[in-house]
Amino acid sequence: MSAHRRKTRHPARRPRRQPARRRPRRIARTLLVTACALAVMAAAGAWYVYRDLAGSIGSSKALEGAEKSKYGDTNILLMGLDSRRDQNGEKLPEEVLDKLHAGSSDIGGYNANTLILLHVPGDGSRAKAFSVPRDDFVDILPQLPPGGSPGQGKDKIKKAYGPAKAKEEERLSGQGVKDRRQLEREGREAGRKAQIETVRNFLGVPIDHFAELNLAGFHHLADALGGVPVCLKKPVQDKYSGADFPAGRQTLNGQQSLAFVRQRHGLDRGDLDRTKRQQAFLAGATQKLNSAGTFTDPVKLMKLVDAAKQDVVTDEGWDLLSFVKQAKNLSGGKVAFTTLPVERFGRNHGEDINVVDDMKIKRLIAEQIGREASASAAAPSPSDAPGAPPGPAAAAPAPTASGSPAIDGGGIPCVD
């Protein structure tokens, strides 16, 4: 073999070891990249959930052009409709009605049986929620077409929605509109405007946002949260609502939650005690939102979003993602609940009504949420005796425990 083709052999080269100090750097870099990727995925997931929620939930223009609160405060009207129909006006399936213990789909109409004004101060101080009893006898101010009369007189505050809806549908039908879903949609818009305007006029404060929930919404919301914690001072049983609960703290599923918020028979003060049930449900739901990790668990959050799509309508343009984050600060007893006072009980066209003092209500609200009323903190708060109407005609003795040990609700208000 010639010399130029002879291969020169070199000793085998051993792989050089990386300095030990580089390994921690590589591990740290890997962890950092992984964390960044997870953060991007979480942000993308949150954005997807928000877009899905904002794009799919029912929206309304009922507050278009309305006056807004000052100082960064927010007033939110929560409306619960006693309707056995979905957002398109279709009857709920019979099996659903049976499960909800709600009777026929023709019962209930479009009464706003739950009305709660939630005031969230812009300075981060304690939020306040005011329950408006559904039978309060007030001026009804429906939003009518140009040239219409300014109002339809006085009636129960819950009835502002239904007549305005029916009137708008009648007007549209007279113009030749026959599409049933369009009539339902535009009729409900008129109903919302009338209900909001009536409540705003009665309370004397702006309403910045609203959320409307139908009867099945309580059921779906509770199930989406995996149950809602409540607390009862004594056991209850009511064949009308289906309520059958022991005393003490307990977690209610969807069907039980609806029975809980609807019960009025068997309660000492009927509807006034029912408003306290609604407050307790709201308190329990906000606590569950926070404690169950709903905001950080994509599966739970999506389940909640799906429930909202079915049953909730809000005003157009409301940044729900910001409010959902803010709602975490409304749990754990951080909301002061008040049921607005009733002067006495009366009758109107054969129906029971709550006689109220409009100016007294406006002053109470102004003192509780007004920035200038700093001395109001020293005044007796109506929340000390929620729903207790003054005067002999409305006075009802509060049930006592007769020496029984107090029940600890664990941050949830205990109700009758």
Image: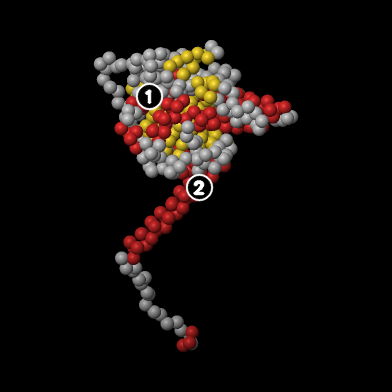
List the single residue furthest toward the right: 176
Residue 159 percent location from the top left of the image: 55, 23
Residue nearer the viewer, 412 or 394? 394
Pinpoint residue 307: horizontal percent, then vertical percent.
Answer: 51, 33
Amino acid, disc 1:
Pro
Place residue 117 in its image quadrant.
top left
In the image as oriented, which residue stretches furthest toward the top?
Answer: 350
Q: Residue at x 47, y 14 (%)?
A: 346
**Which residue is found at the position 51% from the left and 23% from the top?**
138
Q: Residue at x 34, y 68 (%)?
A: 18
Decide if residue 111 is in sight here.
Answer: no
Residue 68 badge: none
- Image quadrant where one finds the C terminus: top left
Question: Which of marks 2 and 1 precedes in the sequence?
Answer: 2
Image quarter of residue 161: top right
Q: Which residue position holds label 2?
A: 47
Dot 1 corresponds to which residue? 386
Q: Which type of secondary structure does the marked residue at label 2 adopt?
A: helix
- At label 2, the amino acid type is Trp
Name above or below for residue 328 compared with residue 8. Answer: above
